[in-house]
Amino acid sequence: MKVGIIGANGYSGAELIRILKQHPEVELSFLGSHSTSGTLITEQYPHLEGISECRLEEMNVDDILGRADLFFFATPSGVAKNHVHRFVDEEIPCIDLSGDHRLKDSRLYDKWYKYSSAPTSVLQKSTYGLPELFREDIKNATLIANPGCYPTATLIGLAPLLKNNLVHLNSIIIDGKSGVTGAGRKASMGTHYCEVNENVKAYKLGNHQHIPEMEQVIQTYTHSDATITFTPHLVPMSRGIMCTIYCDLAQSLSTKDALELYHEFYRKEYFVRIRQENQWPATKEVYSSNYCDLGIAVDERTNRITIVSVIDNVMKGASGQAVQNMNIINGWNEQTGLKITPVYP
Ligand SMILES: NC(=O)C1=CN([C@@H]2O[C@H](COP(=O)(O)OP(=O)(O)OC[C@H]3O[C@@H](n4cnc5c(N)ncnc54)[C@H](OP(=O)(O)O)[C@@H]3O)[C@@H](O)[C@H]2O)C=CC1
Ligand SMILES: CC(=O)N[C@@H](CCC(=O)OP(=O)(O)O)C(=O)O
């Protein structure tokens, strides 16, 4: 199958190339870029020398519609929303890695992303691409809204509790930490070396765009409203996200009970791994892989549960999950191209 990547010279675009070059079912037929069109991908990413000889091309929708059977949008929020309707009209599957098609209520997008949203008719056709929670919906989708990186780690961490009504929904607090690739390849004041090295900083307190996304999924999943607290932090590493999630339990539960519940819930999920009691996952343990690793502890003194959830933001948080979605849409084994052992140390 022919696959195109729009935004191929960004970090998640390059990660898609890394995965797809060893995916047996696909061939890369279009790599799109605006600022570097005309150059070879190896001029932007020398590590792809001998692996991909493709040339980056300008994205003109009329010219590229017939160039692939499926397109990934690896572009910043605010881009895909202007183009995806053309692909939807032609029934060409799209997987959007940005936030443009995640929020079903267009007013929420306008408020949190500060742009006008995609057309409502297109939003209605989008499916939230978190396979571990919504696999059946994804099977029949043609437009996938690939989840945000923090929501991926958080929602996989919370799902067993939500499904079993075990937490007070308004008590959920998420402390997120991200490596700097989460902010994309383009340099900025907040992400250059001197700002990030030997430093940890909180950002976007109370106004991060992933707050309504997580609340929307919790609502869909539990049929109850939730108002959550989420504080992201930037930490001095390239890849990795850790979300430490705290919530009040709605009934008494031991750590052993909670671990049994998580093991049962994720019994068939290849990409979710659960640590034993008193062991906590670290970001390096999922580095460059599509795993989400979880550690659970109940504090019986406070009747609160803590979940530690780690992913590689560029893989399970973006491109790996996007390929997982592509596999599901096409009826291929979900792990195709994604059985990658984490790089350690
Ligand atoms: N990095 C991560 O960990 C995660 C990223 N995401 C999402 O994935 C998307 C891509 O992220 P990332 O790869 O990090 O971003 P980068 O900034 O590294 O890359 C962005 C890409 O989009 C292209 N682009 C920018 N503006 C436009 C435009 N107006 N029209 C067409 N192309 C454009 C850029 O090309 P050019 O330079 O040629 O303009 C570049 O190829 C974002 O929406 C991000 O939020 C989601 C989860 C995690
Ligand atoms: C470190 C860092 O800056 N991370 C980004 C995550 C990018 C992302 O996933 O945002 P979208 O919802 O636009 O896809 C952020 O916190 O905004």
Image (cartoon, helix red, strand yellow):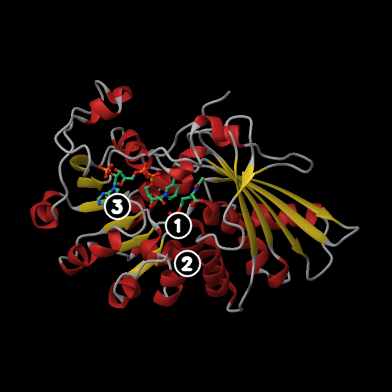
Residue at the (56%, 74%) spot, across then down: 219
Amino acid type indicated by mark 1: Pro
Disc 1 packing (10 Å; few <14; some 14–19; many ≥20) = many
Distance from mark 1 CB to nearest ligand 1 atom below 8 Å: yes
Determine whether, in the image, residue 116 is placed left or right of residue 42: right
Residue 157 against residue 38 in the figure, above or below: below
Label 2, on which residue?
Answer: 112
Instruction: Check whether the beta carbons of the residues at disc 1 and disc 2 lie within 8 A of each other.
Output: no
Residue 28 against residue 300 in the figure, above or below: above
Label 3, on which residue?
Answer: 73
Instruction: Check whether the beta carbons of the residues at disc 3 and disc 2 lie within 8 A of each other.
Output: no
Residue 147's tag is 1
Mark 3 and mark 1: span between their CA atoms? Answer: 13 Å
Pinpoint residue 275: horizontal percent, then vertical percent.
69, 42
Which of the pair 215/206 is nearer the observer?
A: 206
Distance from mark 3 CB to nearest ligand 1 atom below 8 Å: yes
Mark 1 and mark 2: span between their CA atoms? Answer: 15 Å
Pinpoint residue 109: horizontal percent, then vertical percent.
42, 69
Residue 273 against residue 38 in the figure, above or below: below
Pinpoint residue 77: horizontal percent, then vertical percent.
36, 57
Which of disc 1 and disc 3 is earlier in sequence? 3
Amino acid type indicated by mark 3: Phe
Q: Nearer the viewer, mark 1 or mark 2?
A: 2
Determine whether, in the image, residue 45 is placed left or right of residue 306: left
Q: Is residue 333 visible?
A: no
Pinpoint residue 157: horizontal percent, then vertical percent.
62, 55
Which of the pair 239/77 is nearer the observer?
A: 77
Task: Report helix, strand or loop for mark 2.
Answer: helix
